[in-house]
Image: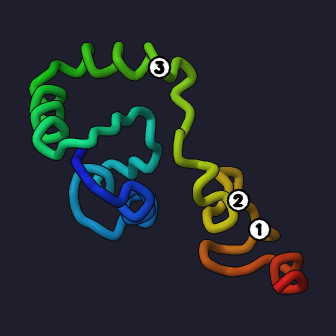
Amino acid sequence: MGVTSRPEKRIWQHKRHETRGFTSKYDVDRLLYWESYDDIRKALDREKQLKGWRREKKIALIKSVNPQWLDLSRSWFEAMLPSRGRDASTPSFGRKTPEQLRSA
């Protein structure tokens, strides 16, 4: 949970575990829920409110808008992230596939 003016950058950092904390410690990398605010004070107030909630209430909020717990940011980085079912023929993170190299 957090406030940022650059959500794509923040999510990318979490997916790559570039910062220490909850997401890297527990290998969390899916965006399940988010809200957008035009006023930073309202965003910070909402963040404090959500952080004060019990886990069950947070889960209910996520399920109300994302019942399948889909990664809402997955399409932002599909070409850059490995699939969950990676095998030896799938390129490692950051490496281009032969198709990507040919089209470059």
Q: Are marks 2 and 1 in contact (CB under 8 Å)?
A: yes
Q: In x, y percent, where is residue 104?
A: 81, 86
The one nearer the camera, 95 or 47, is 47
Left or right for 102, reference 84: right
| Identity of the residue drawn at 12% across and 26% down | 49
Which residue in the structure is indicated by mark 2?
Answer: 86
Q: Circle 1 is placed at which residue position?
A: 90
Where residue 32 sits: x, y (%)? Answer: 44, 34
Residue type, numbered disc 1: Thr
In the image, residue 27 sits, relative to residue 96, either above or below, namely: above
Q: Residues within 10 Å of mark 3 (few under 14, many from 20)?
A: few
Q: Quadrant of residue 21?
A: bottom left
* In this rendering, position of residue 88 left or right of residue 81: right
The front one of 88 and 29 is 29
Tag 2 secondary structure: loop
Query: Of 42 and 54, which appears nearest the observer?
Result: 42
In the rendered structure, find residue 65 and report the number of the disc placed on it: 3
Q: The residue under label 3 is which amino acid type? A: Val
